[in-house]
Image (spheres, rainbow, N blue to C red):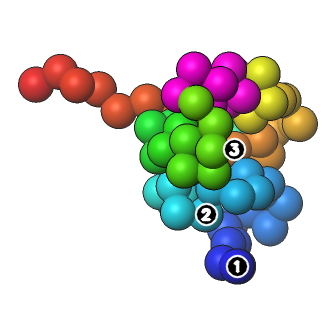
């Protein structure tokens, strides 16, 4: 198990089970830094755990990216395939 920490925001929340998709912290003006994960790597982790790709996307949508738990909620980066 990886012990994740954002020193500038000790209240930052992390997504359990997605340690291998963790990219680091992101921050917006006037907001504390929060954890950031690679969305596609999260999908890959769920598929490796036995979910179909379709079920993995549904799980991410409803149970992960759709879960707002306050200003310390993690963010998920959708990498662009464009130039």
Nearest to viewer (mark 1 / mark 3)? 1
Q: Residue at x 57, y 20 (%)?
A: 54
Relative side of 71 to 5, left or right:
right
Q: CA distance from mark 2 to mark 1?
A: 8 Å
Please tell me which of labels 2 and 3 falls first in the chain: 2
Task: Confirm whether residue 28 shows in the render.
Answer: no
Task: Confirm whether residue 69 shows in the render.
Answer: yes
Tell me if label 2 and label 1 are in contact, CB under 8 Å.
yes
Q: Residue at x 58, y 30 (%)?
A: 52
Residue that protrudes farthest toward the right in the picture: 69
- For the record, the magenta segment spans 53-61
- How far across and down, in percent of the image, does residue 29 sit? 59, 37
Label drawn at residue 1: 1
Residue that protrudes farthest toward the left in the picture: 83
- How far across and down, in percent of the image, does residue 51 sit? 64, 37
Mark 2 lies on residue: 19
**Crowding near pointer 1: few (<14 within 10 Å), some, many (20+)?**
few
Relative side of 50 to 44, left or right:
right
Mark 3 lies on residue: 74
Q: Residue at x 80, y 30 (%)?
A: 63
Is residue 60 part of the magenta span, yes or no? yes
């Amino acid at each position: 198990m990886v012990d994740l920490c954002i020193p500038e925001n000790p209240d930052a929340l992390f997504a359990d089970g997605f340690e291998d998709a963790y990219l680091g912290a992101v921050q917006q003006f006037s907001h504390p830094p929060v954890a950031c994960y690679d969305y596609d790597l999260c999908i890959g982790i769920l598929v490796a755990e036995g979910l179909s790709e379709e079920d993995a996307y549904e799980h991410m949508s409803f149970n992960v990216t759709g879960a707002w738990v306050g200003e310390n909620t993690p963010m998920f980066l959708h990498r662009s395939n464009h130039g």
